[in-house]
Amino acid sequence: MNNVAYFEIQANNPLESARFYEQIFGWTFERAENVPLEYYKIITTGMHGGLFKRPADTPPLNCGTNAFTCSIQVENFDTMAEKILKNGGKVAMPKFAIEGLCYQGYFLDLDNNVFGIFEPNTNAK
């Protein structure tokens, strides 16, 4: 628990980006219908991953890293969120359910780096 267990690639055009990664690395993508945004599971990397429609503007060039986002699997989302906030972190995207899979959310660390946490839960709605 509390290990990086998942990564995401945000894209302005998810289908185009999926084709790029398919051509480069041979990854296979599958559209997930139970997620509240345009989302594709990466099913061939050996690690859980996804590619989805970017929910905010793309950071400008020459302003630091525009990178994959890693999510850390936690035992209890709410307890961990409270701990993050208590230690100076901020909410980047509030907790939401990925139906039947988990509760997910995103935070900013002290340097405004984005990271995710998720709590597996087959009852998530």
Image (cartoon, rainbow, N blue to C red):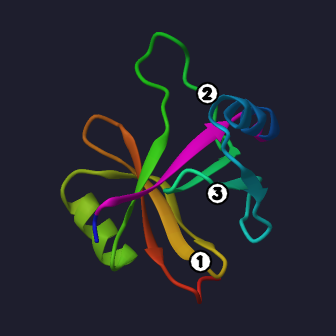
Q: Residue at x 48, y 78 (%)?
A: 120
Distance from disc 3 to disc 2, alpha carbons, whole Å, reads 25 Å
Q: Nearer the viewer, mark 2 or mark 1?
A: 1
The amino acid sitting under disc 2 is Thr
The amino acid sitting under disc 1 is Leu
Is 93 contained in the magenta span? no
**Residue nearest the observer in this picture, 115 or 51:** 51
The amino acid sitting under disc 3 is Ile
Crowdedness near tag 2: few (<14), some (14–19) or many (≥20) residues, C-alpha within 10 Å:
few
By secondary structure, the bulk of the magenta-drawn segment is best described as strand
**Relative to 94, is 84 on the left or the right?**
left
In magenta, the rendered stretch is 3-14
Q: Which residue is mark 2?
A: 58
* Image location of residue 39, percent across then percent down: 72, 54
* Image location of residue 14, percent across then percent down: 76, 40
* Image location of residue 17, percent across then percent down: 73, 33
- In terms of sequence position, does the residue under pointer 3 or pointer 1 come before the other? 3
Q: Nearer the viewer, mark 3 or mark 2?
A: 3
Q: Which residue is mark 3?
A: 43
- In terms of sequence position, does the residue under pointer 3 or pointer 2 come before the other? 3
Secondary structure at numbered mark 1: loop
Secondary structure at numbered mark 2: loop
Q: Which residue is mark 1?
A: 101
* Image location of residue 75, percent across then percent down: 33, 79
**Mark 3 and 1 residues: CB-CB less than 8 Å, in contact?**
no
Q: Residue at x 71, y 66 (%)?
A: 35
